[in-house]
Amino acid sequence: MSRYIKINNKILSYSIALAFLMLLTGLQVNAQTRIISPYSKYGVGELNNNQLSRNIGMAGLGYGYRSNKSVNYLNPASYTKVDENSFVFEAVGYSHFYEQKTVAQAQTSNYSSLGNIGFSFPIIGNKLAVGAGLKPYSLVGYKMLDEDVGEYAGTVNYLYEGAGGLNEVYFGTAYSLFDNFSVGVNASYLFGNIEDKVTISSRDMEGFFSTNKISNDNIKGFLYNFGMQYERELAENREFVMGLTYGHETNFDITRSRLIKRELPGQTGVDTLLHNSTTHDNQLSLPKKFGAGAWLKYNENWSGGIDFDWQNWDDFRRFGDSEELQDSYNLAAGIKFSPTAATYTGFFRDITYMGGVRYGQSYLNVNNYSFDELGMSFGIYIPFSNDNNGINLGFEYTQRGTTEQSLIKEDFYRVNIALNIHERWFIQRRFF
């Protein structure tokens, strides 16, 4: 008797080429992304949290979610659910639209970005599996103008600008300790730049130096997240899953570059007052995080779940500055409906329908105002020739902030599109 594993070269080549192309595209899009949100100046920017391909229409829940056709990086213990001899690949992209209001003004803006590229496959049956991917961790992009009237300089303008963000490359592994119980860990490498710039100028005072102060923080380091999941079959076509995750507090190194330059109005040339670059160890502290979730498959048509997470942003530090952030939490609930021939026919029978809501407190606390977030989402999954491969389309709406206390109210509208591929890469044959 002999045994060998035959790799489907066509699928392998196609998947690797697609992954490589989307990786390059993702890096380019993220490098050019410039969001317009004044609140992204706090912390490490606007966080990109749950971007799961299969769950973008269910408020992004995933701590208790377990699927053989999805890369669930929110809980690395889920990797062991991938079928033996299978390979799962997914990529998520989105367009984000802002509507921002004050008491007297309003504006709209938008940007597009990569949400997540990931893949997963088993190593030893359903006992040991791995997952890996790339996604943006945070985005920074703001532009604000303030002015001050002085006795000698007249009206002095202060233009505050910021750009950049952090990227995350993660690699995880999961192991099934015994039937229905898995543990896992994700090791992530965070890297990126955050630039803050202040331009000071005056239209009233002749000979006033226009001054630029630019600070660029290059941040890099490793981050670890741990997870566990317990799955139990309750009855035929009925399953229950519960999951827990934990990410400990982590310190990162920062290489800070500072540049101060000035110029006289109407003249060429720049006078550089300061230009240096220094590396500081452990000067960025990301706080610990805890997540818990449950998922219930009620029958072959209906399933749903609930998630809760909390992060200790009150302990955030950047060069010793807490930026007066507050602890954040998020509660999300979602439901999924998969029709059968008895309920729908034709094209609509193959589509899966999703919906979700979430409510939470962000880490923003400005002018002693605590920023809550309320969001809702819905989505559909459209399979190709079978349920293994398909496209997820999702829409999200979120509201935060207020027009009171000289603050800005923001409404978000986000359209998601995700490609999901589930293939049997390895075919095992026996000859006698």
Image: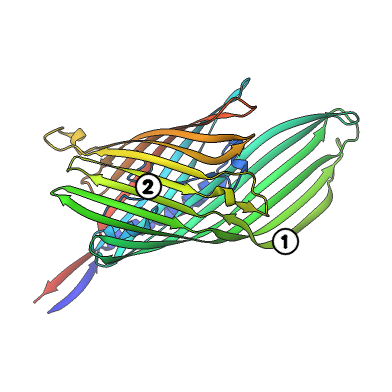
Vertical side of 33 occupied by 399: above or below? above
Q: Which mark is residue 278?
A: 1
Q: Which mark is residue 301?
A: none
> Who's the residue at 84% across and 42% down the image?
263
Per the image, label 2 sits on a secondary structure element best described as loop
What amino acid type is highlighted by mark number 2? Leu
Taking the image as drawn, is residue 393 in sight? yes
Q: Residue furthest bottom?
A: 1
> Which tag, 1 or 2, sits closer to the chain's start?
2
- Contact between marks 1 and 2 (CB within 8 A): the answer is no
What amino acid type is highlighted by mark number 1? Thr
For the N terminus, the image quarter is bottom left
- Horizontal and vertical percent position of residue 325: 60, 44
67 sits to left or right of 26? left
**Is disc 2 surrounded by few (<14), some (14 to 19) or many (20+) residues within 10 Å?**
many
**Is disc 1 surrounded by few (<14), some (14 to 19) or many (20+) residues within 10 Å?**
few
> Who's the residue at 43% across and 49% down the image?
116
Camera-side residue of 38 and 18: 38
> Who's the residue at 60% across and 47% down the image?
43
Q: Report which quarter residue 268 is drawn in.
A: top right
15 sits to left or right of 186? left
